Image (cartoon, rainbow, N blue to C red):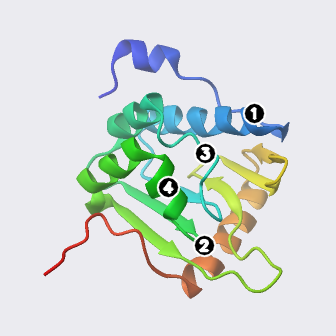
């Protein structure tokens, strides 16, 4: 169960348009805090490489640790995970410990297109960066928009392959 101070510090989930990297990073933090506070069963993060997500921050890992439990599912979808391994050391360590609740897939980008949306999907809220370069997009609680985003993510998931293993075993 999250601590009292953790629950009190958790920001509310935003709704509407957002603009800029700071706004998007704040939404990632808010989603992680809300997941821990509300005990969501599933989190879905999707991005070409997660390079500019605050996954390696101590607060993000604390929220993930508070959220993680049996029966939870964390889905990560990307084109590649090398930026995660390079830039988010705390997250990589957390991923090793909780590998049994995390599923990761990589999708090859078609020439000139982004096969993987930059988005967060949760059971009741979403954030979708429609312009990842400028970190602009839309977030909220609208069931139709959430469903359409999940369908887009699921399409990419189906063509993806297992990636970003919790550990690598060598002989």
Q: Which of marks 3 and 1 is nearer the N terminus?
A: 1
How far across and how far down the image is residue 91, in percent?
40, 46
Q: Nearer the viewer, mark 3 or mark 1?
A: 3
**Disc 3 to disc 1, C-alpha distance:** 11 Å
How far across and how far down the image is residue 64, in percent?
40, 40
Which residue has dot 3 on it? 53
Q: Can residue 37 be seen in this view?
A: no
Label 4 SS: helix
Between 129 and 86, the one lying in front of the other is 86
Q: Earlier in the sequence, mark 1 or mark 2?
A: 1
**Disc 2 to disc 4, C-alpha distance:** 11 Å
From what the image shows, is residue 114 above or below residue 121? below
- Density class for disc 1 (Cα within 10 Å; few <14, some 14-19, many ≥20) is some
Q: Which of marks 1 and 2 is in front?
A: 2
Q: Which residue lies at the image location 48% right of the left edge and 74% below the top edge?
A: 105
**Disc 1 to disc 2, C-alpha distance:** 23 Å
Label 2 SS: loop
**Disc 4 to disc 1, C-alpha distance:** 20 Å
Between 131 and 86, the one lying in front of the other is 86
Count of marks placed on residues = 4
Between 86 and 78, the one lying in front of the other is 86
Which residue has dot 2 on it? 79
Which residue has dot 4 on it? 84
Q: Which of marks 3 and 2 is nearer the N terminus?
A: 3
Which residue has dot 1 on it? 23
């Amino acid at each position: 169960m999250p601590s009292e101070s953790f629950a009190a510090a958790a920001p509310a989930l935003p709704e509407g348009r957002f603009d800029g990297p700071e706004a998007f990073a704040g939404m990632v933090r808010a989603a992680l805090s809300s997941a821990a506070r509300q005990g969501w069963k599933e989190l879905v993060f999707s991005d070409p490489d997660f390079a500019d997500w605050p996954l390696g921050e101590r607060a993000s890992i604390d929220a993930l640790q508070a959220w993680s439990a049996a029966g939870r599912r964390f889905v990560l979808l990307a084109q590649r995970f090398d930026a995660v391994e390079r830039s988010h050391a705390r997250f990589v360590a957390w991923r090793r410990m909780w590998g049994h609740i995390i599923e990761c897939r990589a999708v090859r980008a078609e020439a000139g297109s982004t096969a993987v949306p930059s988005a967060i999907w949760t059971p009741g809220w979403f954030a979708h960066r429609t312009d990842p370069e400028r970190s602009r997009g839309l977030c909220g609680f609208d069931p139709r928009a959430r469903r359409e985003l999940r369908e887009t993510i699921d399409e990419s998931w189906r063509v993806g392959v297992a990636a970003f293993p919790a550990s690598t075993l060598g002989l």
